[in-house]
Image (spheres, rainbow, N blue to C red):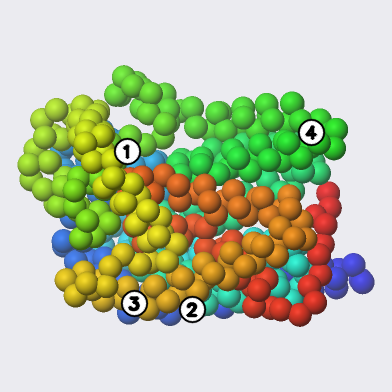
Amino acid sequence: MGSESLTARRVEPYLLVAAVALAVRLAVIPFVYRDWLDPFVLEHWAFGLVARSIVSGHGFGNVFAPNTGATAVLPPVYSYLLAGIFKIFGIETRASVLAALSLNSLFSALTCVPVVLIARKVFGERVAKWAGWGWAFSPYGVYYGADWAWSTCLVTLELAWLFWYAWRLENSSRMRDWLLFGLFGGFAALTEPVVLSVVPLLALWTIYRRYRIKQSWKVPMLAGALGAIAIMSPWLVRNYDLFHKFIPVRGGFGLELYIGNNGYSTRWVNSSLHPNHNDDELNEYERVGEVAYMDHKLQQAKAYIRAHPASFLWMTCRRALYMWTGYWSFSHEYLKDEPLDQPNIFVDTTMTVLALLGLRRVFRRDSSLGMRFAIVLFFFPLAYYFSHPETYYFRPVDPLIVILAAVVVAGGKTEHHNLGG
């Protein structure tokens, strides 16, 4: 009985936090969902276009316009998830939009669970409560859960659990655990391949830690790698079979680099060069095919960077600053199109400062754990510094930022807990 009561007390807090977080997000949806029924939005909703293609029997494709054929611009997991929603509730109907936003709200709310578990192991119950409730009412957690029909909330949940899982593997020699980690990591990569910038590094850090204390590491590393390869291989083979080229999950990097590096600096990206907004670009895409089009965009971007290295360096610094603070410009022309930038700068910068202060505290108490946080914070956004950022690109890191901020805000005497087995 005592053991059961202890279990209930340990489980109940994060379930309550997650339930409140879900209620908050669902309460916001009625005020925002209509934006996703706007014909212009639907016409440029990439995941929606691919999901529509799947449900209509045309396969995984038509990412920029109808009848443009197969694509590897998007990863498969969220596209098929959205296709399932369309199959049940109708293609781009009011019901399907509400279902998609509700599911994303659930993903965002469930992120409270790994947030509480990680925070509890880092600095005990007090910090865990601050972190859990902090995520429940996080402006970014609420907004992207209730009003963003994209893969952001799912990959946020996956990354938080992968952080927890990689940490636990320091004390596990069971091949099953390592195999499952590889499978889960591969699945997350098929949701959003940017996780490959940090999950292998988290695994390698775990391997290094095991090597340092003379625990087995070669077979566990192999098991994790095989798990990831096993789940990713069908998609990689599909892409090679269709496009006759190895494509690491998604093949739109050339376009992403080009629309961020072309001499335009009023905003962080020149959307007018995207096939969704430019008929000439769409015509080229349709005429030459996806692979040749992306190769051409990559060549154009590289040519610009080679010809304007100082401009590229300056824009890279601006993009990095934007990712961490939300600041791009205070010009009247810019703020007219981005009216929420000023409050966003305040929230984003405050969370960044608190997170960095929290990271310093974690490093002082446990440098190995601090390294895990640092890997995610500093490597996750790296590719976006060189291509282009969007406001939602950095959001999968927010749960860890909230934990580190809670370490600072909770204050007082903190408790440090070893992870255990």
Frontmost residue, 18 versus 266: 266
Image quadrant assignment for residue 249: top left
- Mark 3 secondary-structure assignment: helix
Q: N-terminal of the two: label 1 or label 2?
A: 2
Q: In this view, does 258 lie above or below 268?
A: above
Residue wearing tag 2: 24
Q: Residue furthest right?
A: 2
Mark 4, other Cα within 10 Å: few <14 / some 14–19 / many ≥20:
some
Label drawn at residue 342 = 3
Q: How far apart are marks 2 and 4 (CA)?
A: 45 Å
| CA separation in Å, label 1 and label 2 | 36 Å
Q: Is residue 376 above or below residue 364?
A: above
Specify whether 96 is left or right of 21.
left
At label 1, the amino acid type is Phe
Foreground: disc 2 or disc 3: 3
Can you tell which quarter of the image residue 170 is in? top right
| Residue 76, image x, y percentages | 40, 41
Quadrant in the picture for the N terminus: bottom right
Q: How far apart are marks 2 and 3 (CA)?
A: 24 Å
Tell which circle, 2 or 3, labels the residue nearer the N-terminal end: 2
User: Horizontal and vertical percent for residue 165?
Assistant: 68, 48
Q: How crowded is mark 3: few (under 14 residues within 10 Å), some or many (20 or more)?
A: some
Q: Do the residues labelled 2 and 3 touch (CB within 8 Å)?
A: no
Sooner in the amino-acid sequence: mark 1 or mark 4: 4
Which residue does the numbered mark 1 point to in the structure image? Answer: 253
* Label 1 residue SS: helix
Could you tell me which residue is drawn at 61 percent across and 76 percent down?
133
